[in-house]
Amino acid sequence: MFCKYAVIGNPIEHSKSPEIHAAFAEQTGEEVLYTRILGDMEDFNGDVHDFLNDGGCGLNVTVPFKERAFQMVDDLSERAELAGSVNTLIVATGGELRGDNTDGVGLITDLAKNHGFEFTGKRILVVGAGGATRGIIAPLLYKNPVSVTIVNRTVSRAEELAVRFVNYGPVAACGFDQLGGKFDLIINATSASIQGEVPPLPDGLLNDEGWTYDMMYSNEPTAFVKWGRAQGAAIALDGLGMLVEQAAESFWLWRDVRPDTAPVIAMLRA
């Protein structure tokens, strides 16, 4: 069955999601049209309902609307409920709107499957305490790291997340001025790279052979990828692989077909 899908965010013109889903559709033979929507900061719910009332079958949700999407759905997946944020909206058979969060599986799959990162026994730092962070903390803790630390300008927001996930593993919170020790993986879950900026991280946070990962992506190395390289990261990655992997999970939720991500990542990197 032919279906319309879209990604909604603000800003949105940089999004590669339409190219990704077009590639998935061509690969799988699914009849899909996928577009971008610049979300209205004042009327996100109206934009969603307008799209769905016009025949849309589902939406991906990106910055800054993931927590608003969480508030508007009729039914939540377990991982979306745990995250407190939604990046995938699904119109169920009965017409109700379901919310899911595929960010965590996208991040873990990219790091572990595509790049061979071993999470067990590692010290992980997550920068930021917004919707993107909410989606990845539990999946990270499930991988048995020594610790996950959330650092944020507003420390109380990081502390709220640490309390939310404390039963899932060793998670802590702090401000930038309280950071100490060294980490094996530093994940930038802020949108600072969109403005070409880097969060105020001190030097010397990376262990020898430590990795950095920017959940944002760009045609050129992002500001955080450049920071990682300057800090001596063994591997400094952007979020393109995560984007493709979480998109594949969304595609599967919508179409019950799981696309092959490797050729799509290679196409986008070319």
Image (tube, rainbow, N blue to C red):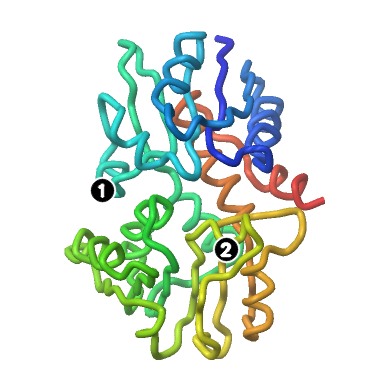
Q: State the residue lying farthest toward the front.
A: 42
Q: State the residue lying farthest toward the right.
A: 270
Q: Which amino acid lies under the numbered mark 2 shown in the image of this protein?
A: Asp
Residue 192, image x and y in percent? 56, 61
* Alpha-carbon span between mark 1 and mark 2: 22 Å
Q: Do the residues labelled 1 and 2 touch (CB within 8 Å)?
A: no
Figure disc tally: 2
Q: Is mark 1 on a helix, strand or loop?
A: helix
Q: Which residue position holds label 1?
A: 82
Residue 79, image x and y in percent? 30, 45
Left or right: residue 75 compared with residue 3 = left
Which residue is depicted at the point 30% across and 17% down?
96
Q: Earlier in the sequence, mark 1 or mark 2?
A: 1
Residue 34, above or below 231: above
Q: Is mark 2 on a helix, strand or loop?
A: strand
Residue 40, above or below 235: above
Left or right: residue 37 compared with residue 184 = right
Q: Which residue position holds label 2?
A: 214
Which residue is depicted at the point 26% across and 48% down?
82
Q: Which amino acid lies under the numbered mark 1 shown in the image of this protein?
A: Leu
Which residue is depicted at the point 35% across and 85% down?
178
Using the rendered view, name the quadrant where residue 223 is placed. Answer: bottom right
Left or right: residue 148 compared with residue 241 = left
Residue 89, above or below 177: above
